[in-house]
Image (cartoon, grey):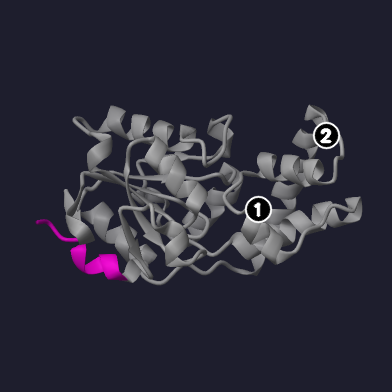
Amino acid sequence: MVIFPGGLQADAVIFDFDGIIVDTEPLHHKAFQRILEPLGLGFSWQQYVDTYMGFDDRDAFIEAFASQNRPLDAATLASLVEQKARVFQTVIQDGITSYPGVVELITKLHQMQVPLAISSGALRSDIAPIVQQLDIAHCFDVIVTADDVTKSKPDPETYRLAFKKLASRTAPLSPERTVAIEDTPAGISAAQGAGLQIIGVTNSYPKELLSTATVVLDSLEKLIPFAVHP
């Protein structure tokens, strides 16, 4: 167990990925534009932040087509998701930067034997090479991605599945003593729907838009001193 700011008691911690572990949102935006601009469906960075951030790839493409009243069948959607995954792999070859303190925090929690998971709307093919590059793949007991669920955040399915998988490995475990770390309003809503406590981090949105989180911080570096046995 670890006690975080605000007296949050955590027997397990579930991390969002994009916007919490790494700043891949600009890279996702770039990959989407390479696919959508030739179709006349491109969108600005601000539109991405306001509308698309927090969606998984499927829902992002669905929204892009719906916003222009363009039809989108299942086969085309599947093809677009595959194309975007390939483009993203080329984009990340330029290098990935983790957020300050997050690798140290994950490593310390792992050393404390705190069960850890990732709950993300990204594809497993997006996440796997990055956690390997950061040398933290071995720290996570569970990784739940868009490949594992049918609904993206703010639906709680991703967090419910991550908690269920952690609980099957770590008994007893309760949602009330499991902390989700999130950077988006959609992610916070998803974690709340799963009954989890939430630490919001202002990596992507201002504090006032994350106010429904249990605790809001401006950096995960502030959690490092708490990663000790109580």
The residue identified by callout 2 is 72
Q: Is mark 1 on a helix, strand or loop?
A: helix
Bounds of the magenta segment: 222-230
Above or below, comparing residue 148 to residue 197 in the picture? above
Side (left or right) of 151 relative to 196: right
Side (left or right) of 60 relative to 150: right
Q: Quadrant of the C terminus?
A: bottom left
Magenta stretch holds residue 227: yes
Magenta stretch holds residue 61: no
The residue identified by callout 1 is 51
For the view shown, which residue lies furthest in the left direction?
A: 230
**Which of the 4 image quarters holds residue 207?**
bottom left
- Residue 107 visible, this orientation: yes
Would you call the spot at circle 1 few (<14 residues within 10 Å), some (14-19), or many (20 or more)? some
Would you call the spot at circle 2 few (<14 residues within 10 Å), some (14-19), or many (20 or more)? few
Give the residue displayed 19% in from the left and 30% down from the top.
172
What amino acid type should be assigned to the residue bearing mark 2? Leu
Residue 196 x, y percent position in the rendering? 32, 41
Residue 82 x, y percent position in the rendering? 74, 41
Side (left or right) of 71 relative to 172: right
What amino acid type should be assigned to the residue bearing mark 1? Thr
